[in-house]
Image (cartoon, helix red, strand yellow):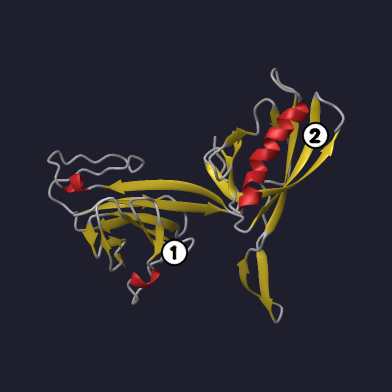
């Protein structure tokens, strides 16, 4: 099992590789909050959660345990000071969080220091991402080849529809990126239309994020502008993608990427 932390700047550390060794903690435990009315269950939800991450910090060939611990603290606190969470990964599944505290045993030693780090998150789910990409060239190719869904492109002959597989057992949040140039782009996913009334120039793209409920236009220089009011109003632009096979229909005149977020209360067990 690979356990790693990636802060918002992209700095990554493997927490289960020398000089760090992760120990058993409550990291994989979960519990839904229960809502009741008149002594009856009416729903489930979640609140801010705290978990523990126990790590033994060892001396390495190039540095002592205290120096290696300092390096770990700097990676964690970069997120705290910026107010932007990092990602804690177990294999390819991640949870967005902050590392907010640290308690230590054997502080005086420089061979090994036992540390218990406090994790806090306002979204206590483990996420697996599956990405699909559709290109203008996909509908002009003549070889009519289909690859498994884990590969991004579907090549067809004069067609403007294909499908994706949502691997989750339930409906899933998504991020949809539509690339210019295009006017008023619309994409059908599983028979449901996603439409934004906007003009995108070459090098610009539109990003719809159902998890954050944002609709943003991203300029060539990376500057973001909310275009929430440009979305089609009759149907929610943030409707989650149903599980299983979903037909994709679009005019084939622009490129787009679809990222599916598979959210779980605990990481999915892998062989």
Where is residue 241, by image quadrant? bottom left
Q: Of tags 1 and 2, which is closer to the observer?
A: 1
Look at 68% across and 36% down and name the residue there: 72
Q: Position of residue 17 (x, y in %)?
A: 65, 27
Is residue 57 in sight in this rendering?
yes
Q: Is residue 196 left or right of residue 2?
A: left
Query: Given the current orientation, which residue lies at the most extreme front position?
Result: 221
- Quadrant containing the C terminus in the rendered view: top right
Q: Is residue 193 left or right of residue 143?
A: right
**Residue nearest the observer in this picture, 131 or 73:** 73
Distance of label 1 from label 2 (alpha carbons): 42 Å
Q: Is residue 170 left or right of residue 221?
A: right
Mark 1 or 2, nearer chain start: 2
Q: Position of residue 10 (x, y in %)?
A: 53, 40
Look at 33% across and 70% down and name the residue there: 230
Check disc 1 and report the residue beneath it: 214
Look at 28% across and 69% down and name the residue there: 197
Note whether 73 is above or below 265 in the view shown.
above
Check disc 2 and report the residue beneath it: 114
Look at 17% across and 48% down and name the residue there: 139
């Amino acid at each position: 099992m690979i356990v790693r932390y990636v802060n918002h700047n992209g700095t990554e550390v493997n927490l289960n590789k020398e000089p760090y060794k992760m120990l058993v903690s409550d990291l994989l435990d979960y519990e839904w909050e229960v809502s009741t009315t008149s002594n009856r269950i009416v729903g489930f939800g979640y609140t801010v959660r705290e978990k523990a991450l126990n790590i033994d910090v060892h001396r390495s060939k190039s540095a002592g345990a205290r120096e290696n611990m300092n390096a770990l603290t700097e990676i964690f606190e970069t997120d705290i000071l910026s107010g932007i969470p990092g990602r804690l990964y177990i294999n390819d599944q991640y949870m967005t969080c902050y590392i907010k505290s640290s308690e230590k045993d054997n502080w005086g030693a420089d061979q090994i220091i036992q540390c218990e780090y406090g994790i806090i998150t306002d979204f206590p789910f483990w996420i697996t991402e599956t990405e699909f990409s559709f290109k203008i060239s996909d509908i002009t190719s003549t070889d009519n080849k289909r690859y498994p869904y884990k590969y991004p492109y579907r090549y067809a002959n004069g067609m403007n529809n294909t499908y994706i597989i949502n691997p989750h057992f339930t409906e899933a949040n998504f991020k949809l990126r539509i690339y210019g140039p295009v006017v008023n782009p619309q994409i059908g996913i599983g028979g449901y239309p996603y439409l934004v009334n906007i003009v995108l120039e070459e090098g610009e793209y539109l990003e719809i994020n159902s998890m954050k409920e944002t609709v943003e236009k991203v300029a060539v220089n990376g500057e973001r502008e909310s275009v929430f009011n440009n979305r089609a109003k009759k149907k929610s632009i943030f409707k989650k993608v149903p599980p299983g096979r979903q037909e994709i229909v679009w005019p084939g005149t622009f490129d787009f990427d679809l990222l599916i977020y598979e959210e779980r209360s605990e990481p999915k067990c892998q062989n």
